[in-house]
Image (spheres, grey):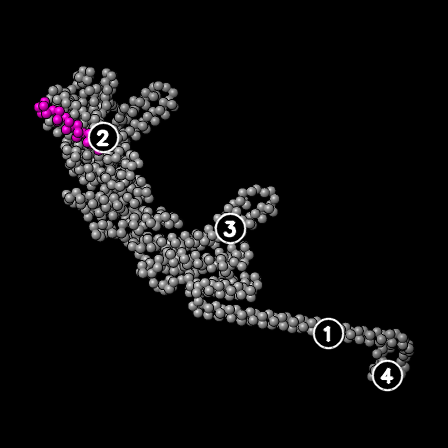
Amino acid sequence: MRGPTSTPIIPLAKLPTNSTSTTTPTPPPKVGEELLYNITFLCNSYEDQLKSTHSFVSSTSSKVTSLANDVHQLQSSLQKQNEKIDTLTQVLSILNTMEQDVSVGRSRKEAEEILMTQLASLEELFSVQELRDIQYDGMILPSLVSPFIECYYLPKYWNEKASLFDEKEESSSHVCREIVTNICHLAKCICSHAKDKEQHERTQQLIYTLVTQHVVPRVKHAFQSTLSWDPLVQVEDGLRLYESLIDSVKENENDMGVDDDVKEEEGLFGVQHDDEDVIMELQAAAAAARNQTSNTKTLVNLVKEEIMFDVIYPRLYRTLHEWKPIIFNQQLHHPLHTWIVPWLPHLNHRSMLQTLLPDVQRKIKSTLTFLARRYKNDAADDDDIMDYFQEAKRVMQPWRMILDTQIMYNLVSESMVPRLGRFVSKMSILISGKKQDWSRLDLVCELLDIGLLSQFDFISLVEGEVMSHWADTMHEWISSKMEKKKEDEGEVVNDVVEFYIAWRTRMMHPHSTLSNNNSSKVQQQQHQQPVSWLVLQKDEMICRHFHAALLMIQALIEKDEDALEDLTPPVKEEMNYRIVSARRARETRMEEEIQRNKRASAAAADTSASTSAAAGIATTRTQRENVDGTTTASFRDVVEEYAKQHDVTFHPRMGPNSTKDGKPIFLFGSVSIYLDSNVVFALRGVSKKWEPISLDDLVRCSL
């Protein structure tokens, strides 16, 4: 080991051979520098060794510490695992005890107390966080309570394949309500030791889980099974079971104070605050209130979703499509209203009614068609035909407040009114009012009063099939009595007057239009006026018939055969409800057209700037347009204008005897005329014959 200034030693082989060569003498080494260098080198070497040794010792020490920590953690973990093993051992012991207690066959009250004690002991073994981690409330607790419910709350046939609608078993609706009530009571007892907020949430969650596990599936299966529940027969049983389940769940909702929570939430948002922090706190409180009430509301919705929408409604809809009208024991077997109407209050979910009612309408129409084919013989006895109308009334009446009014009127008008017209047309008009059979007329009035027959069809039937026949009968009777002797005149007039009063009272009296049944008695007691009486009293044509009858009586008293001849009603073959319906429909259209013209003329008068324009509009209404665009007045317009020029009234004749060979009769002043091929025919002379007449002569006759 030498220093940096020492002379290097030259090997002998490399020494120069020339003896004459000269060498430079080497200076002596510096011992101090060399020693300093060597000492420094040794110090650095030992220092490096010391550092490496220190580093090794330090790393080894940290490893030892880490290993010691690992050992401590393993010991702690081992201790925790041992504690968990002890806890699970205790849990297993508690579960075995619970299983043994259930199988022993104790009384329900004693078993409930033991169950509460065991569950409380079980919950004490876990912390709150551990209970949440293992999903104790959502999964474990319902599983532990389920054996107790199946053993003590559910009857034997509830878990078996026996039908819930078996008449031999206890009422399923009562059992269902009792099961839900017991489940709610049990859930409240189990969660009673928790805090107020946690108690409410846990109770609701437990009730929801237990009801969906033990009640909803069994009820759903009962409605699904075609062997268990028949929608046509077991209507009341199914309703009681479904309603008991819904009501029991809603009662639990009220007991849990859901309404109060909702009101509290509304009260929170009813106050305005400027502080955003306060608003956020109120919103959080409201959200908590909604969470507290969500389970019960969801349970009600679940029952409707799982049972009504998924099971009952499809069964009803499928049964409706498969249903066909049949007669059993002289009556319609299982009519629609007996098994569909009771369910309608519950079919308020997902637009069920909008889908079901159109099919109901089609089935009602097919039922009426079926009944018409069954009672197709109009020549049969009155009792048989009356049975048809009574059966049809039983089919239609329950739906009058459910289906649209116009739909009901259309169904009756298409299916029943034609036959009703033929039935009423055979009504015998007896001179003696005491022997008169009013059943046919009462039937028509009853159909109107209960809302099945429209006023238009009703008044057309009465005028076309009853009043026209009555007026013809009265006219023939009075005509036959015109030749009676004077000593018999008073008796004849009295008989005619009694006949008139009997019909006038029967048609217009408010308490005589319905049959003598309970409904009419109630109306008499309450002094109500049936709709049929009001319609008859307000109708102009019905009043005209009675007025014409009075004129006939006056002609009888005065022995005026000409006046009686003028009052001759149309023959029965030329007057029926179809003709009256057509005439009334035409009059309605004409009245609507007149009203439209009045409104149009009023609007034109308001916007017109000159009277000539208004006159042009008026002229347009009274003229007809030809194909080439020119306008010419009709012959009726000419006659009407001629009457205006001479201040003579001109208007159509209304009521009976208002046509001649299908042509309308007009009153030109007091003269009856009709128009045919631009010729005026007037009823004139002693013989009262229709003769052609000029317009000038017509004016002189009318003055």
Label disc, if present, on residue 56 of the rendered structure: 1
Residue under the image location 41 percent in, 59 percent down? 179
Mark pair 2, 3: CA separation: 65 Å
Where in the figure is residue 379, as x and y percent of width and height? 14, 43
The residue singled out by tag 3 in the image is 290
Residue 493 among magenta residues: yes
User: Mark 1 or mark 2, which has the lower sequence index?
Assistant: 1
Q: Tell me if I can see residue 137 in this picture.
A: yes
The residue singled out by tag 2 in the image is 542
Q: Is residue 615 above or below residue 537?
A: above
Give whichever of 532, 599 is nearer the camera: 532
Mark pair 3, 1: CA separation: 65 Å
Give whichever of 112, 286 is nearer the camera: 112
User: Mark 2 or mark 3, which has the lower sequence index?
Assistant: 3
* Magenta segment: 483-507
Residue under the image location 32 percent in, 47 percent down? 357
The residue singled out by tag 4 in the image is 17
Between marks 4 and 3 in the image, the one whose residue lies nearer the viewer? 3
Residue under the image location 38 percent in, 56 percent down? 174
Between marks 3 and 1 in the image, the one whose residue lies nearer the viewer? 3
